[in-house]
Amino acid sequence: MKVTKVTQIDYAILGLVSQEPLSGYKIRMAFEKTALGNFSSSPGTIYPALKRLVSLRHLEKKKRSETRKGPVDMAITKSGIQVLRDWFHSPVGREEVTKNRDLLLLRFAFMDGLVTVPSMIRFLASFEASVTKYIKELEEFHTSEAPKLPVCGRLAVEHGIASYKATMTWCRAAQKHLKEKR
């Protein structure tokens, strides 16, 4: 069955290539040497994703000049840019906040030059609102269940609350920074 839905690795590749055309090897090395590796740096993941993105016409192979030797670069297409923009503008949901915060930060990291500052601020506000709501759920759980939890379980929940509060604080600071730069 042919995959037509854009995957997490696809978004990461599209975001990376939106910054500049890159060869498959350079894309793989970016995944290998940076936090993008959390999504996978395996050639068995990267190269099939590149092939899929070319077949979906979200990436294209950049033609080599006769004087240039070496690997072919991948460049993002208008379709690929639109896929990214749609992703950037999609609302932040509970599942993303609870299971994919790293993907939300990746989404934000690739926004420069592809969406407006007000769009970035809206994304951060949506992120903040979802995180704030989840913190409330965690705090309610902690209040009702902490006395029943073993010490390490209680401390783990408290770490989660502190971690989400740090994310909420960052969202607010990032929004303030972007508003001041307007």
Image (cartoon, grey):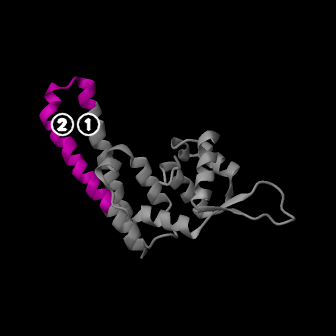
* Nearer to us in this view, 140 or 83: 83
Regarding residue 30, the answer to whether it shows in the image is yes
- Name the spot of residue 142 as percent of width and height, x first: 18, 36
Label 1: few (<14), some or many (≥20) within 10 Å? some
**Residue at the right extreme, as displayed:** 67
Q: Residue at x 29, y 42 (%)?
A: 162
- Name the spot of residue 10 as percent of width and height, x first: 53, 53
**Residue at the front extreme, as displayed:** 1
Q: Which residue is mark 2?
A: 142
Look at the picture and state if 132 lies above or below 143: below
- Name the spot of residue 168 as percent of width and height, x first: 31, 53
Q: Which residue is mark 1?
A: 158
- Name the spot of residue 110 as percent of width and height, x first: 50, 60
As helix, strand or loop, the secondary structure at mark 1 comes to helix
Residue 71 lies within the magenta run: no
* Nearer to us in this view, 27 or 52: 52
| Circle 2: residue type | His
Residue 78 picture quarter: bottom right
Q: Residue at x 19, y 45 (%)?
A: 137
| Circle 1: residue type | Glu
* Nearer to us in this view, 125 or 13: 13
Look at the picture and state if 162 lies above or below 81: above
**Residue at the top extreme, as displayed:** 150
**Callouts 2 and 1 close, C-beta under 8 Å:** yes
Mark closer to the chain start, 2 or 1:
2
Q: CA distance from mark 2 to mark 1?
A: 8 Å
Magenta stretch prevailing secondary structure: helix
As helix, strand or loop, the secondary structure at mark 2 comes to helix
The magenta segment is 126-155
